[in-house]
Amino acid sequence: MPNIVFLPHKKLCPEGAVCEANTGETIIDAAARIGIHIEHACEKSCACTTCHVVVREGFDSLNECEELEEDMLDKAWGLEQESRLSCQARVGEADVVVDIPLYTINMVSEHGD
């Protein structure tokens, strides 16, 4: 089973975290399993950018980015070459290192933060 390493995030996981992921599992679902609640204003339907993450290692092992996700990513705050929406990025066979940006373009958080 591949591991997902979540780099430290001031609010969501100050110490960082590591979890085992099932092949084909989305990054956001794996994060939620270990108590990291990545914001997702569209209920994981690829209709916003609040679950934007940057994949620092293992980017090529994820499923291919589809056109709708690419279109949404164009609106993400802090977009980088290795950006993905965590609701769409499915883990492959290799370990992945994920950086959760400090900010999103969402004006309202689902969790009341």
Image (cartoon, grey):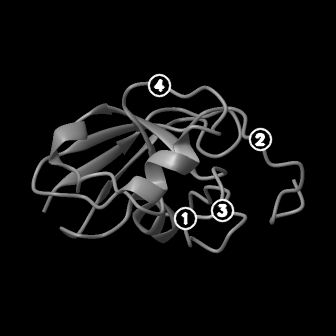
Mark 4 Cα within 10 Å, few/some/many (few <14, many 20+)? few
Residue 107 shown left or right of residue 33 in the figure: right
Disc 4, SS: loop
User: What's the residue at 15%, 47% (across, down)?
Assistant: 61
Query: Which circle's residue, 2 or 3, is located before the other in the chain?
Result: 3
Question: Tag 3: residue type?
Answer: His
Residue at the image position 16 percent from the left and 57 percent from the top: 92
Distance, label 2 to label 3, CA atoms, is 11 Å
Which residue in the protein does label 2 denote? 105
User: Horizontal and vertical percent for residue 54?
Assistant: 44, 34
- Which amino acid, by three-letter code, is at mark 1? Cys
Q: Earlier in the sequence, mark 1 or mark 2?
A: 1
Q: Nearer the viewer, mark 1 or mark 3?
A: 1
Crowding at dot 2, Cα within 10 Å, few <14 / some 14-19 / many 20+, comes out as few
For residue 62, side relative to residue 11 (left or right): left
72 in relation to 40, above or below: above
Residue, disc 1: 46
Looking at this view, is 18 or 27 the one in front?
Answer: 27
Residue for badge 3: 40
How far apart are the two marked residues, 1 and 3, measured between alpha carbons? 9 Å
Please name the residue that numbered disc 4 is placed on.
Answer: 80
Kindly check if marks 2 and 3 are in contact, taking CB atoms under 8 A apart as contact: no
Marked residue nearer the N-terminal end (4 or 3) = 3
The answer to which of marks 1 and 3 sits earlier in the sequence is 3
Q: CA distance from mark 1 to mark 4?
A: 18 Å
